[in-house]
Image (tube, rainbow, N blue to C red):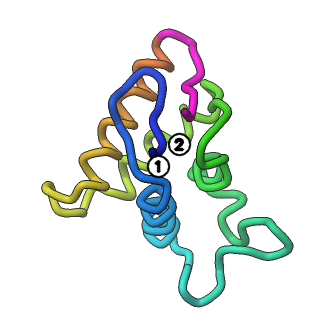
Amino acid sequence: MGIDFSHCKASWSYGGFSKFRHRIAEECGLDVAGGDMYEYGQYKKLSTHDIYPFIDHSDCEGDMSVENMKKVAPAIRKAVEQWDENDYDKMMAIRLVECMEEAISKNEPIQFI
């Protein structure tokens, strides 16, 4: 069991996806270990960042709109660009970005499954 997406073969275990999103948040300037992540159930500091709709999204259900993907896809790509090429999270992130780009071109949301 884990998380998958429509339009592509990117996937993580639930725990792995949570860790991946924390890594992405850190790349965007949050001190996850230092408590920057949450305040009253909301993500602090990140709410105005383009990555916010991805970080704040449910782990296992719902979809992401084309409008949000237009912001999220480049933010994910930029966040992982310096990661090692053999890093599983980077490989899956690139797949996810590519499927977001495909979905955008078709004007379709992606589903978190």
Q: Specify the farthest residue to the front.
A: 1
Identify the mark at residue 75; answer none if there is no mark: 1
Relative to 4, residue 82 above or below: below
Label 1 element class: helix
Three-letter amino acid code at disc 2?
Val
Q: Do the CB atoms of the residues marked 2 and 1 lie less than 8 Å apart? A: yes
- Name the residue tied to disc 2: 72
Relative to 111, residue 51 above or below: below
Per the image, is 109 magenta?
A: yes
Q: Secondary structure of the magenta portion, mostly?
A: loop
Identify the mark at residue 19; answer none if there is no mark: none
C-alpha gap between disc 2 and disc 1:
5 Å
Per the image, is 11 magenta?
A: no
Q: Specify the farthest residue to the right.
A: 40
Q: Quadrant of the C terminus?
A: top right
Residue at (13, 56) in percent of width and height: 86
Three-letter amino acid code at disc 1?
Ala
- How far across and down, in percent of the image, does residue 112 sit? 56, 34
Label 2 element class: helix
Lateral position of residue 18 relative to residue 66, left or right = left
The stretch in magenta equals 106-113
- How far across and down, in percent of the image, does residue 24 sit? 45, 62
Residue at (47, 62) in percent of width and height: 15
